[in-house]
Amino acid sequence: MCVKEVLVQNQVGLHARPATFFIQKANEYKSSIWVEKEERRVNAKSLLGVLSLGIVGGTTIRIIADGSDEEDAVNSLVELVKSGFAE
């Protein structure tokens, strides 16, 4: 299992368009991936799950993956969040 914390830096957080980019990236991996905010954990491959966390800019989240490509999955999702979802 691989776990990393990252600060959401873009102003709107993980809403609509950024959340869509996030789940698309998560779905590129075979590992099970979760996003955790405070005590809530949701499937990172689920748009409704990610949106339900209400993640705004300035929030620290944990990205957790378990599987054959867990480190690559977590690292790429952390980089995506750090980039502010710039494509």
Image (cartoon, rainbow, N blue to C red):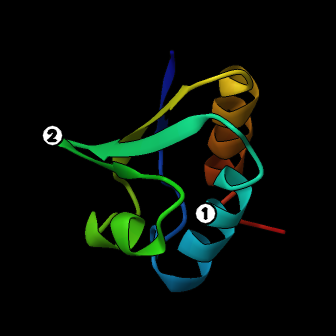
Q: Which residue is mark 2?
A: 39
What amino acid does circle 2 point to?
A: Glu
Screen quadrant of the C terminus: bottom right
Q: Position of residue 31 (x, y in %)?
A: 63, 34
What amino acid does circle 1 point to?
A: Ile
Q: Residues within 10 Å of mark 1 (few under 14, many from 20)?
A: some
Q: Nearer the viewer, residue 64 or 6?
A: 64
Q: Which residue is mark 1?
A: 23
Q: Is residue 58 left or right of residue 11?
A: left
The tag earlier along the polypeptide, 2 or 1, is 1
Real-space Cα distance between discs 2 and 1? 20 Å
Residue drawn 41% across and 63% down?
57
Q: Is residue 78 visible?
A: yes
Q: Is residue 56 visible?
A: no
Q: Position of residue 18 (x, y in %)?
A: 59, 73
Q: Residues within 10 Å of mark 2 (few under 14, many from 20)?
A: few
Q: Position of residue 64 (x, y in %)?
A: 47, 31
> In which image quadrant can residue 56 be found?
bottom left
Residue drawn 49% across and 53% down?
44
Asked if marks 2 and 1 touch (Cβ < 8 Å), the reply is no
Q: Secondary structure at mark 2?
A: loop
